[in-house]
Each structure stands twice: as structure tokens, then as C-alpha cells.
Image: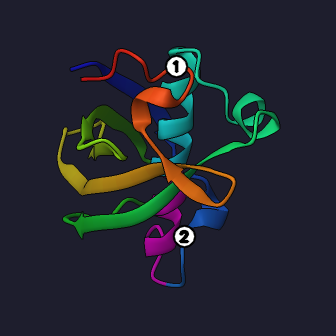
Amino acid sequence: MKEHELRLTVRDYECDLQGIVNNAVYLNYLEHARHTFLLKDGIDFAKLHKQGVDLVVSRIEIDYKQSLSSGDEFIVTSSMHKEGHLRVIFNQKINRALDNKLVVNAKVIGVGIKGGRPIRVTDIEGFKDIE
């Protein structure tokens, strides 16, 4: 199973009144890491969309373990595998870089849609060899 790491830094505007990253912002971090991971493997969302294929999230399970604050550096680790014929599963973690503490643990389930209907993962360009 392939694994991808992306290092980022918390920006001031991502924090709430408590001075910690707002829960919804973690979803943005995870999404950006997935897109970076897929682009690294040559899977381009814009190109697929022009071909009539859209990759969409159907479910996210997320456990918040620690909080990040402004200026914290962190690492998003992503891996993916297929589940059945239609689903791609991304297992993602966010760890604070300073102490490697687990901040977020997430499972993101995605599917491919063409013409409003789900399609087999292996029929999507770039996903031919996914395990």
C-alpha cells in the first residue's frame, strides 16, 4: 500500500476563539493531502471532470485526539486502497511535527461518479493498479 506525507503549518485564521484549529478546518487539511497524493500518482481531478468522471467523498469517519494551534507544524499521512468494486478508502492521520502526537485519525470513503451513477474504481484512469 502506497503512503504519502504532506507537511503543513497552521495559519492564524484557521483557529477559533479558543486559539485552536476549528474542527472543520481539519477536513480541509485532509482533502488537500488526498489531492496532493492523487496528483503525485498522476490522477488529476480537473482532467477527470472534463472526461465526465467526478471523484466524490461519500463518508468520513474522524476522531479528534489533540488540538493544533497557530504556527504548529504537522504532517498528514495518507494511504489508500479499494474496497469492493466501487469504493476507495483513504486512511489518514495528522500528527503534530514537534512531538509526533496523533491529532486526527480519519477514514475517508470515496467513489467515482460518471453520468450521475457510480462506476468501478478500476475503470477510473489512474486507479487501474489500486489494491
Q: Quadrant of residue 2?
A: top left
User: In the rendered view, would you say 63 is above or below 76?
Assistant: below
User: Residue 46 versus residue 22: which sits nearer the camera?
Assistant: 46
SS category of the residue bearing label 2: loop
At x 30%, y 45%, the residue is: 89
Side of 130 relative to 110 (left or right): left
| N-terminal label among 1 and 2 | 2
Q: Quadrant of residue 108?
A: bottom left
Name the residue type under label 2: Cys
Q: Is residue 106 magenta?
A: no
User: Residue 108 versus residue 68: which sits nearer the camera?
Assistant: 108
Q: Give the residue at mark 2.
A: 15
SS category of the residue bearing label 1: loop
| Quarter of the image with the N terminus in it | top left
Q: Quadrant of residue 100?
A: top left
Q: Is residue 28 magenta?
A: yes
Give the colouring mode of the picture: rainbow
- Disc marking residue 59: none
Q: Position of residue 103 (x, y in %)?
A: 25, 55
- The stretch of residues the image draws in magenta is 18-29
Q: Give the residue at mark 1.
A: 126
At x 22%, y 67%, the residue is: 63
Name the residue type under label 1: Gly
CA–CA distance in space, label 1 to label 2: 36 Å
